[in-house]
Amino acid sequence: MLGGALPGLVTAVVLGQRGARVLVLEEEAATRGFPGLREPFLLPSSERESVLGACLRALGIALIDQRRVQLDPVALQVALPEARLDVGDPGLSASEWVAWGLAKPQFARALARGLAAAADAERRALLAAPFVRSGRRLGLGTLRGMQTRRAMATLASEPAAVGARGLPAELGELPPTLAAVLAAQTRALSRLSAAEPSPEARARLLGAPLEGGASIRGTPWLREILRQRVLSLYGEFRSLAGPFAIVSAVGQQPGIAQSGSEEAWAGRVLILNAPLAALAKVTEQPNLLGLQRASSEERRRLQLHFRLPRHAVPEAMAPRVLRIADPTAPLEGPNLISLRSFAGSGDSEQVDLVASAVVPWDAPDVAALELEITAGTAALLPFAESALRPQRAPEVRWDSDDWLGDPGAGAGWPAPIDVRAAGRLPIYGLDRTASASLGVEGDLLLGWRTAEVIIADLS
């Protein structure tokens, strides 16, 4: 597997559960960065019937680790020039909209109830759907030790009724500032570049925060929990420091060959778990782009990592904050900053902050954008003073979570995602642009269901 992004770690766990040995090759520079740069901004509810809860159970995550995932009643805060909203369960969110003058009481309650119901219907639809499909059968024979039963065997054998789906009518009558608040949520929680999410995906993005947000006690890294699970199933992680190419080994097995080395790694299946456009550039193999439908990758998340003394972070600030500088302006660049805080373990007096904004991929003056993001972050941290200086991370070329893309026409939820094999070689692409409209839940399901497809193909 090429890349250490979240969907691939989920795939690696499921394949390991079915008897496969998985080698995960990560970019060396990516392994040296601050782990919080690769963590989701918001993990929606970890309750048993949530997407995250169902995924953790299906992956066989130890109960002690599952119990470390706690539910925060406040999923996130939205900071406006004249307001600071807490977003949580429908009652809390509606009361906040009313208290800050964003909506009338009856309208606010109806909107919150409608969004919660729409999000619940989409959650059940997501868990019941195949989500991905294989481009073709590969006929490679049976992989010893693998079973063909679905990972969903841990859930009910018959899909639950999904119920009525659709967005509440109140969304068409939103007051301007409340419309900006909800648009900021969809912008921050999705991985889309510029496209609008489908109505189904929008229902999930808007309603998921009403279920609360999940935090992990202790070492707060979801990716680390998954990495340890991969290692427990006899998986392995290695790093790539220089150029490489995708090659065909003996018996039409796909492999990875590093420049200047006579050694190559080969396997029954190769899984591309990094932005396909980035892989095509670094390998100088543009045909890799044939693994995905036409998509655009014109934007990225520009992330800055700050390390501050604990006293510099206001006690009332939530671990997840959206800062809107001007609700009447486009929610792009430093006008919309996502801020995630990670408190040090134990008695640590340090807090790590990750501030990010969506910017053009080829922005001509990145330094100026970084200054604007820093200034916007400082507006929320009046006690930070001169301590607010970005920590510099190694430059990552391909094993990155920063790339954003829009799916091609007809792709994306609720349409199933094609996991295509390239030519005669068993190569699969975890194309996150196709699941981008669902954010982290799309990542989890993309990895989970792709593993099931690979198992079925190999069997």
Image (cartoon, grey):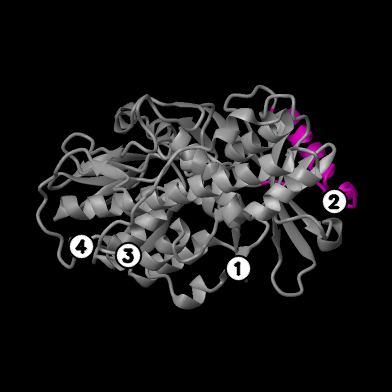
**Three-letter amino acid code at disc 1?**
Thr
Answer whether labels 1 and 4 touch (C-beta < 8 Å): no
Q: CA distance from mark 2 to mark 1?
A: 24 Å
Residue 400 visible, this orientation: no
Among the 4 quarters of the image, the one containing residue 164: top left
Q: Position of residue 143 (x, y in %)?
A: 15, 60
- Which of the two residues, 334 or 232, is positioned nearer the viewer here? 334
Q: CA distance from mark 3 to mark 2?
A: 49 Å
The stretch of residues the image draws in magenta is 366-392
- Give whichever of discs 4 and 2 has the lower sequence position: 4
**Three-letter amino acid code at disc 2?**
Ala
Q: CA distance from mark 1 to mark 4?
A: 33 Å
Bin the neighbour count of mark 4 within 10 Å (Cα to Cα): few under 14, some 14-19, many 20 and up.
few
- Give whichever of discs 4 and 3 has the lower sequence position: 4
Residue 298 visible, this orientation: yes
- The residue singled out by tag 3 in the image is 155
**Three-letter amino acid code at disc 4?**
Arg
Q: Position of residue 354 (x, y in %)?
A: 68, 49
Q: Position of residue 252 (x, y in %)?
A: 15, 44
386 magenta-colored: yes
Please name the residue shown 66% across and 32% down the image.
179
Q: CA distance from mark 4 to mark 3?
A: 12 Å
Question: Comparing marks 1 and 4, which lies closer to the viewer?
Answer: 4
Q: Is residue 362 above or below residue 249?
A: above
Q: Quick one: SS at disc 1? A: loop
Q: Position of residue 457 (x, y in %)?
A: 17, 50
**Three-letter amino acid code at disc 3?**
Leu
Bin the neighbour count of mark 1 within 10 Å (Cα to Cα): few under 14, some 14-19, many 20 and up.
few
Q: Quick one: SS at disc 3? A: loop
